Image (cartoon, helix red, strand yellow):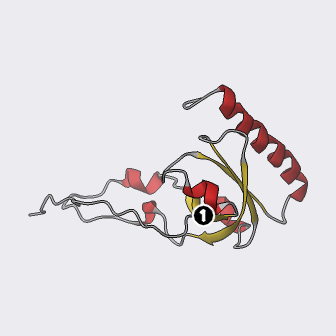
Amino acid sequence: MPLPLRPALTFIPDEERFVAGAFWQNSLLRLKEGDEAEVIVDAIPGVVFKGKVAKNLPAMAEGEIQFSGNLQSSNKLFQRGRVLVLIDVEDHELLAQLPAGVAGQAAIYTEHFSHVAIMRKVLLRMQGWLNYLFGEGH
């Protein structure tokens, strides 16, 4: 019989912080460590954090099945998860002032489709400035 145990504590590590971005799986074809990245955070409108891809995480939640004593439904086979990518942001001091879990958007610029990168940079900045006008839930 499975025991209904749950964690009693939450540990928040006090280490160097990274931003985690969730990207479509086909992005893995072109993403690599060291690619240029930019991040905007809803809590700080108009500020664009520059950084680099630090690591592509090697697993996704959809690749894990936890024992429960129940048969698994085939619906789980058709869920499309996103790949998590860690971004090392240059401005560590400003990032350290934010609580873990703040939301935002990220863009990664690869050597492929570099002509589209200019448009993406403009759109990211426009979205960052919209955070002044529309708070959470826009």
Query: Is residue 123 or residue 9 the one in the foreground?
Result: 9
Which quadrant of the figure has residue 50?
bottom right
Say which residue appears at 63% left-offset and 54% top-offset.
Answer: 94
Image label count: 1
Question: Which residue ends up furthest to the top in the rendered image?
Answer: 133
Which quadrant of the figure has residue 127?
top right
Point out residue 43 in the picture as x, y percentages from the top left corner. 59, 41
From what the image shows, is residue 41 above or below residue 37? above
Horizontally, residue 95 falls left or right of residue 73, namely: right
Question: Which residue ends up furthest to the right in the rendered image?
Answer: 115
Which quadrant of the figure has residue 104?
top right
Say which residue appears at 69% left-offset and 73% top-offset.
Answer: 33
Query: Is residue 27 or residue 69 the one in the foreground?
Result: 27
User: Taking the image as drawn, is residue 41 in sight?
Assistant: yes
Q: Which residue is mark 1?
A: 85
Question: Which residue ends up furthest to the left in the rendered image?
Answer: 1
User: Taking the image as drawn, is residue 23 in sight?
Assistant: no
Say which residue appears at 66% left-offset and 66% top-offset.
Answer: 28
- Mark 1: amino acid: Val
Query: Is residue 19 or residue 58 the one in the foreground?
Result: 19
What is the secondary structure assignment of the residue under circle 1? strand
- Circle 1 Cα neighbour tier, 10 Å, few/some/many (<14 / 14–19 / ≥20): many
Position of the N terminus by quadrant: bottom left
Point out residue 74 in the picture as x, y percentages from the top left corner. 37, 54
Position of the C terminus by quadrant: top right
Point out residue 100 in the picture as x, y percentages from the top left corner. 48, 54
